[in-house]
Image (cartoon, helix red, strand yellow):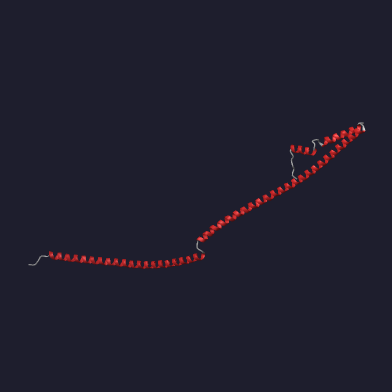
Amino acid sequence: MAVINFTEDDIIKRKLLIDGDGLGDDRRINLMLKTFFKWCSTHENDEEQALNYERILLMLTNCEHSMAKSQQILSMNHLEMKNYQELYNKIDTGIADSQRKIAELKAELQQAKIVRKNKQEYDVLAQIIMDNPDRCDTLSRLNQLEEEINKLQQIKENLNKRLEKRGKQFQVLLTSAHELKKMLSDEDNNIVNSIDDQFLDNLKRSDKPAHV
């Protein structure tokens, strides 16, 4: 149960509310007792005794009324405290429910952030997939490229064979040209030698004396 703290002003106001005319119950009871003892100990005439008796009864009635009033106020205070306690419990329960709902909303917000992040990543991947051809188109393109590569490889092999053949033919041609050059050189040498021999013979003949 919650403890309700009263200030000094609250205590004075409650005391005045209970006392009614500003006199405390203790003073009222003490005054009634003094009057009663005085009434019992003094010897007065009947009229004064009756008057004091009526006064004592009135004071007793006031005390009873004050006690009843205090009891009623006390009951009202207990009822008010009970209402305050129920209100406090409701507020406490409401605060707990609000905190629980806030925690749930935070968890939902965090989950929503994760879902949003995953959705953004999915959209990026989907866009990448949309920008690239599908599997069938890719396989078809790969097959076309393989066919083109095979054709180019065949063309390359044919060119290599032709180059090899041309190389052999060129080598034969070079060999033939070299042999032809050698043959021409030998023939030139033979011709030069023949001319030289003939020239020498002519010189020898010219050196002999003529017969008279």
Extreme residue toward the top, this view: 43
Q: How many marks?
A: 0
Question: Is 201 located above or below residue 42 in the figure?
Answer: below
Left or right of residue 104: residue 121: left
Left or right of residue 201: residue 110: right
User: Where residue 150 sits: x, y (%)?
Assistant: 44, 67
Q: Nearer the viewer, residue 153 or 120?
A: 120
Q: What residue is drawn where x is 35% and y is 67%? A: 166
- Quarter-of-image position of residue 67: top right
Extreme residue toward the left, this view: 212
User: Where residue 22 sits: x, y (%)?
Assistant: 79, 36
Q: Nearer the viewer, residue 170 or 106?
A: 106
Q: Quadrant of the C terminus?
A: bottom left
Q: Nearer the viewer, residue 153 or 48?
A: 48
Question: Is 32 located above or below residue 2 in the figure?
Answer: above
Left or right of residue 195: residue 17: right
Left or right of residue 56: residue 183: left
Q: What residue is drawn where x is 86% and y is 37%? A: 58
Q: What residue is drawn where x is 49% and y is 65%? A: 137
- Quarter-of-image position of residue 69: top right
Q: Nearer the viewer, residue 197 or 5?
A: 5
Question: Is 44 located above or below residue 209 in the figure?
Answer: above
Q: Quadrant of the N terminus?
A: top right
- Quarter-of-image position of residue 59: top right
Extreme residue toward the front, this view: 47
User: Where residue 64 sits: x, y (%)?
Assistant: 85, 40
